Image (cartoon, helix red, strand yellow):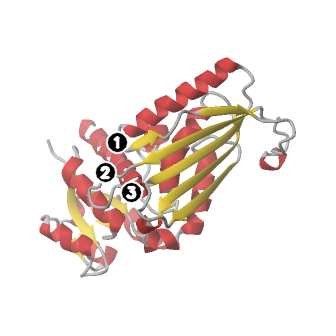
Amino acid sequence: MSRTKVAIIGSGNIGTDLMIKVLRNAQHLEMGAMVGIDPASDGLSRAARMGVRTTHEGVAGLMALPDFHEIDIIFDATSAKAHQANAALLAPLGKRLIDLTPAAVGPYVVPAVNLEDHLEAPNVNMVTCGGQATIPVVAAVARVTPVAYAEIVASIASKSAGPGTRANIDEFTETTSAAITQVGGAERGKAVIILNPAEPPLMMRDTVFALVHAPDPVVREQIISSVEKMVADVAAYVPGYRLKQQVQISEIPDDQPVETLLAEGTPRPTHQVSVFLEVEGAAHYLPAYAGNLDIMTSAALQVAERIAARKASA
């Protein structure tokens, strides 16, 4: 069976982990090139040792490779600003782009929620690590009952936040908040990221709070079942993704001021859904505590695999 060739732009932590996932786990993909700008980077050195073609001349170097025309899918694991420039160069050449930065040039994609809707999109955005971990839960609640407001808190080990992550903190919150509503289905959304300096480093932890109108106990049971099913769906491609404790649904006290969180005219919600998650990385390249990076690369791999599988069956 022929495989779809892919290239990865960005030889840092995310790009290198993704390369190893493609080499070890992909069913429909093969590595065509690893692209960086630092000839001494560990990612480029490791790629060369593993038999992957490399270039340290960025996108220009990628486009100059003799077999560039054979590469169909390109992952961008650089930065939001860099992706905008990269997309401008590559999109006109008919390459499919999977964006692991918060640039959001193309539609947001969270595989367990809306992958099938965007298989033909020329450029898809993987939101953020926090978005990949929490938006499926928001969507799981929203498919049972409307979500008036959703707030997510992503806590990651400080050691797992490289220069790209730190440079994109503002984009992280903006992109994740937008995707909470556009993909998760909440009427309003907010995202918070915490870089936890604890030693030894802790696993990625994510908390989802959703305000809903669910006075019927049957609806509340349906919410719990929906969330548990969604967690299983995500764990199918991110094995370290799990509930840290049981889903909690509590009644909102009458004197709790939630109106400032709601869109104008939204009925007052009756209950708060609280979901606590943990993401353990597969440790392909980075330590297991770097679940924030693992969920991004796992989700991106899932998207590329599905695109390639569809192409093979066409």
In front of the other: 146 or 313? 146
For the residues labelled 2 and 3, the Cα–Cα distance comes to 9 Å
Q: Residue at x 21, y 58 (%)?
A: 31
| Element type where label 2 sits in the image | loop
Q: Are marks 2 and 1 in contact (CB under 8 Å)?
A: yes
Q: Residue at x 49, y 38 (%)?
A: 113
Look at label 1 and name its amino acid. Answer: Pro
Q: How many numbered badges does the structure rendering display?
A: 3
Q: Is residue 192 above or below residue 140?
A: below
Going by the image, does 11 lie left or right of 166?
left
Crowdedness near tag 2: few (<14), some (14–19) or many (≥20) residues, C-alpha within 10 Å: many
Residue 141 point in image, percent of width and height: 60, 33
Going by the image, does 99 lie left or right of 282?
right
| Element type where label 1 sits in the image | loop
Marker disc for residue 287: none
Q: Residue at x 20, y 54 (%)?
A: 23
Residue identified by numbered label 3 = 289
| Element type where label 3 sits in the image | loop
Look at label 3 and name its amino acid. Answer: Tyr
Going by the image, does 300 lie left or right of 217?
left
Which badge, 2 or 3, comes first in the chain's sequence? Answer: 2
Residue identified by numbered label 1 = 239
Look at label 2 and name its amino acid. Answer: Ala
In front of the other: 12 or 96? 12
Quadrant in which the N terminus is drawn: top left
Q: Which residue, as the protein is rendered here, is positioned at the far top?
A: 218
In front of the other: 313 or 111? 111
Residue 209 point in image, percent of width and height: 64, 43
Q: Are marks 1 and 3 in contact (CB under 8 Å)?
A: no
Marker disc for residue 282: 2
